[in-house]
Amino acid sequence: MEHGKRTRARRTGPARISSKNQVALPASVPRTLGLHPGDLVDIAEEGGQIVIRRHRSRLDGVIGTIPGFTEAVDVETSRESWS
């Protein structure tokens, strides 16, 4: 998305909240946003609406700015290789 331009949200119809508070997203939404199973998202209430955003670590902005820290590290993958 270009800076300053907004896209209109696609409405695909109602979704039902399960007894476990789960909601299924239309397949086109995560695909369009490049989200995959297991990706983290942040969920918030803003002005009476539910907002879902791609999760960004607080460290995402400093990766590459500190000498010696040039790339993100997947801690879980690293941990698995230790055993």
Image (cartoon, grey):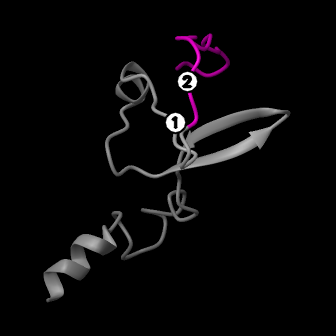
Residue range corresponding to the magenta coloring: 1-17
- The residue drawn where x is 45% and y is 62% is 63
Where residue 5 sits, quadrant-wise, is: top right
- The residue drawn where x is 58% and y is 11% is 11
The relative height of residue 77 versus residue 61 in the rendered view (above or below) is below
Mark 2: amino acid = Ala
**Coordinates of residue 35 in the picture (x, y in percent):** 37, 37
Side (left or right) of 10 relative to 66: right
The relative height of residue 47 versus residue 13 in the rendered view (above or below) is below
Q: Which residue is mark 1?
A: 23
**Coordinates of residue 33 in the picture (x, y in percent):** 42, 29
The relative height of residue 10 versus residue 83 in the rendered view (above or below) is above
- The Cα–Cα distance between marks 2 and 1, rounded to whole angstroms, is 7 Å
* Badge 1 density bin: few <14, some 14–19, many ≥20, Cα 10 Å: few
Q: Which residue is mark 2?
A: 15
**Coordinates of residue 71 in the picture (x, y in percent):** 33, 63
Towards the viewer: 40 or 69? 40
Task: Look at the numbered disc 1 and give the secondary structure of its residue.
Answer: loop
Residue 16 magenta-drawn? yes
The quadrant of the rendering that contains the C terminus is bottom left
Cβ atoms under marks 2 and 1 closer than 8 Å: yes
- The residue drawn where x is 32% and y is 74% is 75
